[in-house]
Amino acid sequence: MPGPAVPVSSASTAPASARTAFDVASPTPSRAPAADLRGPLGRPLGTSAVRLGPGLLADWQGRNREITVPHTVREVGRAGNLENFRRLADDSRAPYAGRYPFLDTDVYKALEGVAYELGREDHSDPAVSSGCLGTTRDFYEAAVDLIARGQRPDGYVGTAFAGEGALREPWSDLAWGHEMYNLGHLVQAAVAASRQLGDQRLLAVARRFADLVVDRYGEDGEPAYCGHPEVEMALVELYRETGEPAYLRQARLFVDRRGSGTLRHSIFPAEYFQDHAPLRELTSVTGHAVRMVYLAAGATDVAVETGDTDLLAHLEHLWDDMVATKSYLTGGLGARHSDEAFGDRYELPSERAYAETCAAIGAMQWGWRLFVATGRADVLDAVERILYNAYAVGLGLEGASFFYDNPLQRRPDHEQRSGAESGGEPLRRAWFGCPCCPPNVVRWMAQLQDHVAVADDTSLTIGILTAGRIDSHALDVDVVTAYPFDGEVEVTVRRAADAPGTLALRVPAWAVGATATLEGAETTEVPGVGPGWLRVTRRWAAGERLRLRLPLRVRRVTSHPHLDATRGAVAVLRGPVVHCLEQQDAPAPVDDLVLVGARERPTSTSDPVTAYAVEGLVEIRPARSAEPYPELDETGAGPSSPVSPVTSVPLVPYYLWGNREPAAMRVWLRQS
């Protein structure tokens, strides 16, 4: 029988007291913290407790396992990344393959994703044609062996700065050498291998390299840091895995030192490296976007583990300012191609949006950490926007081609280029000379389930709404939903503790008018469902269902008046999914179309690109004059242009654009 009371809270953020009540260690803890990490809503539930069920995210993971991982393994082999390790392991005279000093991370990021895929109970190795690498398992074994054998006696690992033909001496250029950035990705791969496979071999390698860094750059060492942040969050994760406090201390040192100006700045100024001012004094995110969000993610880990509530509050401020003034509608980050950087506030040009795929991944890493630390639902709203737009667009529908940058507009005469080279690929590429994004996509896709839910002894909180099976101390549940394309989320209790417990579901801010029912021996309406958290506390019984219904209405939005690039334009969303118009679906050049309305469109499964399109209502309005700057008359009117009857066009999910032949595209459409 259901319990008598159904208390509900729908606040958009955790109470102020809860948002600072961390279960944290001192800066030099002696505990082994992995199982104790938690925020006001509990600790994250990882792979052993969350399994994605039928739906979009599970489909993405299946494609990752069957297509993207084998493709990435094959391309890493072709590019010579493994041969770079082999030349050290076998002490050969082969030259270093590649022009960048961070290509080791392509192997490490691929290994992190592969560790997750090999660790799944239902995994069978997909065969790949990649020379000597016959299977994903073969890649894993070969890479781990070569990395271990290529490690120097002092613990150093780095193929660009060792052996014959090294690019330069180790530690000679911290601004551009990326050695500790490389260490960060090695650590993350090693921790994944330890947790998912119980394989400690890579962890031993990573610890020796980390120990070298602690000895060289620790409290009694050189007061320096890496030009590309990343090692900070990795060192905190290594601390969580091993309980060794030196790693947490080192992460904190790196966070606190940055901004002291010790890097040798070349090519770009100090702001590019976030080295012009201490992190705690930054008023806004700045510089190279990936560097910035990686730094902020690591600093959030440090703040949580050391109980530094002032630092955490400042990071919340930076996040809020970024989302409000420096993020694209898709959640993409980075407005400038020249230095892959954030621009000024509201500097967000659509056709020149850089919005690097790696920046989207780094922003989700930061956002997830902020959510765990604060319990803020609105932070996950932003993470979800990134997930279904700025991140998802980086991978082609077939799973083996990638965007590096992700504009919100493509002009008819566009050539994809960074600004220096001529020509350029018209759409996604199979690989890049600087291939940081593809293996990053692989590793994040493989661990999506780790960023779905948190729990404590008496509650289960589902932050990312997706189908799956979730186990926790208080409740084991099955979630059935076709979200983000359908707004109904059904959560069925499989097992409940013999005590009252709280089941919480995130209600996105756009879901005005959401409703919920509790179904058991009888059906009860849950009152007061609003943006934030739907929380139901009761003595649960197996078989009871909580149904959340989110109104996935088609919405038209405009932009802030300070955002010059899209002033007067309109964009269309349905739920968290941004939509766009591709030339293939337009009756006239997309630049000549004016959006006068948008509505639901019957779902079609015949074309995977248009299957979940919405219907845009447009008029054809060619330019009023061939003059680039026509003069207004005394009434303020310009030349008139003919207007066609209203016609309908499919507006496809933005993340699916570019999967047909090259053509023009717009997210932001004219209103006049």
Image: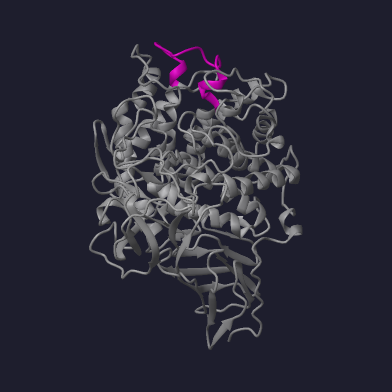
> Does the magenta portion include 38?
no
- Res 194 visible: no
Residue farthest toward the bottom in the current orientation of the protein: 522
Does 555 appear above or below 212? Answer: below
- Whether residue 33 is visible: yes
**How is the model colour-coded?**
one colour
Quarter of the image that includes the N terminus: bottom right
Apparent side of residue 17 relative to residue 496 in the rendered image (left or right): right
Write the residue at 68% across / 21% down: 223
Residue 474 is left or right of residue 667, and the answer is right
Of residues 266 and 595, the one nearer the viewer is: 595
Residue 444 placement, left or right of 537: left
Residue 51: quadrant of the picture: bottom left
Vertical placement of 185 versus 322: above or below? above
Residue at left 26%, top 56%?
Answer: 585
Residue 449 place in picture, x, y as percent = 47, 55
Residue at position x 48%, y 48% from top? Answer: 566
> Could you say where residue 165 lies in the image, as x and y percent from the top left?
39, 11
- Which quadrant would the C terminus be assigned to in this image? bottom left
What count of labels does the image hold? Answer: 0
| Image spot of residue 155 (x, y percent) | 54, 22
Is residue 170 magenta-colored?
yes
Q: Give the range drawn in magenta.
A: 159-180
Residue that sits furthest to the front in the current view:
634
**Residue 313 or 460: which is nearer the viewer?**
313
Position in image of residue 356 (x %, y %): 45, 39
Which is more toward the observer, 641 or 423? Answer: 641
- In the displayed structure, 278 sits above or below 665; it is above
